[in-house]
Amino acid sequence: MNRIFRAYLIVALVLAVLGATSALAQGPSYVVTNNDLLNETSSANFYKYDAGALQGSPLNPLPTEGSGLGGGYFALPRVSIDPNTKCVFIADADTDDITAIQYPNVVGRFTANKNYNSQTWGMGVVSGGGYLYASYSWSNQIEVFKITNTVQHPCTLTDTGNGILTGGLNLQPVDGMTLRGNVLGAAYGDGSVGTYKVGDGTISLVSEVFANCYSEQWGFSTPTQVYITKNGKWMIADDAYGANGGNLWDVFALDGATLGTDILTYLSTGDDAVIAGSNTFVVSPDETVLYAAGTYSGEFTGKFMALSTDNFDMATGAITGTSCKGAHVPGFYTLWQWPGNTVVAENVGKGGAVYQALAGFTVSSNSYIAVNEADTNGCLTYKFMTENPDSKTALSIQSYPGSPNQ
């Protein structure tokens, strides 16, 4: 009898664990965007999405007390969620400061020790390893801040004074940034990319090279966003401004923090090619699929944005197109004006969901979040948009409490 009781107890515990796991898999997803208002108080905007019903709703905005530019480089990450502390950092380029949030509270607002300026193309922020790295576009500076998170000093930033002057090979500001371990990758506005060694509050330049797309073959083009794979073997750049109107991928081999030559340039073609514009991209959590977002031009202008799907081979660095039709997000130049960063969130739909921040069509128009469902093959289907009356200029987006790729 005692053995039977123990058997029932074991079964009950197993069912309880399975139930908890299932509830976790179907639990809510959260994303956070900035609200890059010019001459007004900006805000951080949190959204909650129900995984089962694929329904979303904006939560109460959190004012940053700073102000943004209402634009700039669209691939710049203006929102960073520190993977260790889960502190949320929002960059405001007009006031050149960074707001810290320990959700649901704003806990601080921080500036660099020197008067660095971001009022040309914006300020980008990435964090990890106990530090935050902020790029200032006018000053061409990446500054290093130490992150402290205690009861007395939650989500506090302290400027280490160990920043570095940047500028790429032709002295242009940082367009996109990414951080993987002790390597920071950057794309510049001159068609080049670079890598930096970071750690212990310091930063030093390791290498800079031009992308292959910066050539007569493709015309002038600019890597807008960068991503370093989890194994540290590759750095991928999405090249937005190809003369032939397609989505150009640059893949650089990494030897430690040293960049090799751009080994591959891939041009997406067909109905779902991402046309030159304010392109951004995101890599799926398993690093097999790349989703790129861009606005259509030519006969499609003013209709929609497409998110294309391309396959990535971790062993070779090769990128190949898929037979997927892209997700077509409606409302371009009627509801919204510019697509911001893209983020993948897990546990939504069949194979995850890709969220896109969409800035309002005018300074008085509301921002939107586009939700696109991915199937088990990574192919996307547009599902719906969430309108936020408290946000006008959503340019950056992250999953909260942290990205699956961190």
Image (spheres, helix red, strand yellow):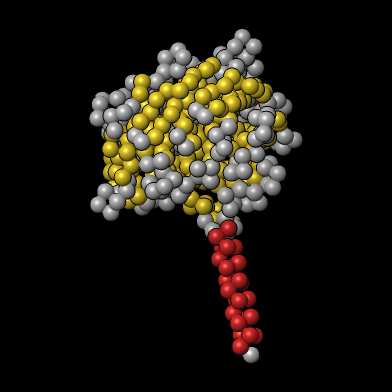
Question: 172 left or right of 276?
Answer: left
Q: Position of residue 267 (x, y in %)?
A: 67, 23
> Observer-nearest residue: 240 or 136?
136
> Observer-nearest residue: 142 or 376?
142
Q: Position of residue 32 (x, y in %)?
A: 45, 45
Look at 65% across and 22% down and name the residue there: 264
Q: Is residue 244 visible?
A: yes
Quadrant that contains the N terminus: bottom right
Q: Position of residue 315 (x, y in %)?
A: 67, 34
Task: Quadrant for residue 3, please give it.
Answer: bottom right
Query: How many discs appear?
Result: 0
Look at 28% across and 38% down and name the residue there: 158
Q: Most extreme residue toward the top, as rendered?
A: 216
Q: Most extreme residue toward the front, as rendered?
A: 256
Look at 65% across and 85% down and name the residue there: 4
> Observer-nearest residue: 108 or 203?
203
Decide: is 286 above or below 73: below
Question: 102 left or right of 274?
Answer: left
> Observer-nearest residue: 87 or 76?
87
Look at 32% across and 48% down and name the residue there: 149
Task: Quadrant for residue 171, please give it.
Answer: top left
Question: 47 left or right of 108?
Answer: right
Q: Is residue 119 visible?
A: no
Task: Quadrant for residue 174, please give it.
Answer: top left
Question: 118 left or right of 194?
Answer: left
